[in-house]
Image (tube, rainbow, N blue to C red):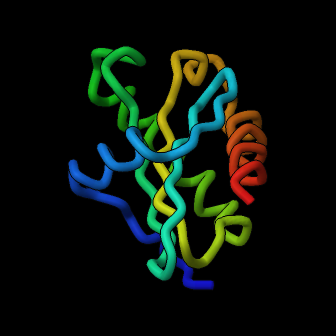
Amino acid sequence: MSPVIARLSGEHNFLNIYRHGRRFKTSVAQLAYLRLKSEPTRVAVVVSKKISNLATKRNLYKRRLWACLRQQRQLLPIKGYNVIITALPAIKNLTYQELNREIEGLIAKLK
């Protein structure tokens, strides 16, 4: 598998996933996805201002989530999914290792 995870962008893609996709939720993050036929899997990470008003904190949580995704990329399907991972407020209380286990569990539910 490629060492780079393809990034999902575009408001229409996000709206399509939120309207027509499915969701899994833990206390730390929510995974929304939409199954597609032949496109490569693309991923987006969302950390809203509900988590923190400080951009530096939101960026920290985004970096942690992306690092977890890079470690778990072998679990991501190669084709057929658009995925959005949204952080929830409980992410502030977790260590990186705990967050990594949570993301691994979410990705395992994807298959």
From this view, report whether residue 81 is shown above or below residue 60.
below
Residue 10, quarter of picture: bottom left
Left/right of residue 15 with respect to residue 87 in the rendered view: left
Left/right of residue 73 with respect to residue 38 in the rendered view: right
Residue placed furthest toward the front = 20
Residue placed furthest toward the left = 11
Q: Residue at x 29, y 20 (%)?
A: 54
User: If the image is split into quadrants, where does the C terminus sit?
Assistant: bottom right
Q: Could you say which is closer to the camera, residue 20 or residue 24?
A: 20
Q: Residue at x 52, y 16 (%)?
A: 89
Using the rendered image of the protein, determine whether residue 64 is visible from the camera's viewpoint. no
Residue 58: x, y in percent?
Answer: 37, 30
Residue 17: x, y in percent?
Answer: 41, 48
Left/right of residue 74 with respect to residue 83 in the rendered view: right
Q: Residue at x 68, y 36 (%)?
A: 99
Q: Could you say which is closer to the camera, residue 111 or residue 53?
A: 111
Using the rendered image of the protein, determine whether residue 9 is visible from the camera's viewpoint. yes
From this view, report whether residue 53 is shown above or below residue 19.
above
Residue 29: x, y in percent?
Answer: 59, 31
Residue 68: x, y in percent?
Answer: 62, 51
User: If the image is split into quadrants, where does the N terminus sit?
Assistant: bottom right
